[in-house]
Image (spheres, rainbow, N blue to C red):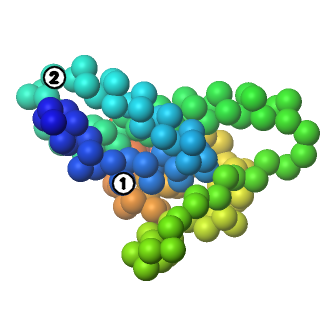
Amino acid sequence: MSEHADRFTHLRPLLFTIAYEILGSATESDDVLQESYLRWAEVDLPAVTDTKAYLARLVTRQALNALRAQSRRREDYVGPWLPEPLLTDADPSADVVLAESVSMAMLVVLETLTPDERAVFVLREVFGFEHEEIAATLGKSTAAV
């Protein structure tokens, strides 16, 4: 595997979770990860000082773009939108993952936030990113996040 693939694969669970918490859809999250990997594969690795921060920023931006496109598509949908449940195996370790993930009710609440507000909440409250990192990711001032 290439160095790009190694780094991306190592962080894939985190990246998927970021995308899923923002989008509420496993399918759309996978699409975001594929698009993010294609962009990541073009990056000059020696220029990247923090792979985790770089990839989290890349996936967050891709997820926000997908969420904005998704919300435009939902304007035509009749009825309440509910997030897609994340299906898990009966594997006991899945209980740990399930315990750490945001509940269906939280996803419904997150749906009331704007895309940027949702990203700020997920990155800060779920993943513990600092406000400065979130501001840089969203291209906003620290005071705005």
Disc 1 residue type (three-letter): Pro
The residue shown at (63%, 31%) is 68
Would you say 3 lies left or right of 139 here? left
Which secondary structure lies at badge 2?
A: loop
Q: Earlier in the sequence, mark 2 or mark 1?
A: 1
Residue that protrudes farthest toward the top in the picture: 42
**In this figure, which residue is indicated by the disc labeled 2?**
44
Binning the other alpha carbons within 10 Å of mark 1 as few (below 14), some (14 to 19) or many (20 upward) gives few
Would you say 111 lies left or right of 77 here? left
Q: Position of residue 40 (x, y in %)?
A: 28, 28
Q: Position of residue 142 (x, y in %)?
A: 40, 44
Q: Position of residue 135 (x, y in %)?
A: 40, 41
Q: Are marks 2 and 1 in contact (CB under 8 Å)?
A: no
The residue shown at (34%, 31%) is 37
Binning the other alpha carbons within 10 Å of mark 2 as few (below 14), some (14 to 19) or many (20 upward) gives few
**In this figure, which residue is indicated by the disc labeled 1?**
13
Which secondary structure lies at badge 1?
A: helix
141 shown above or below 40: below
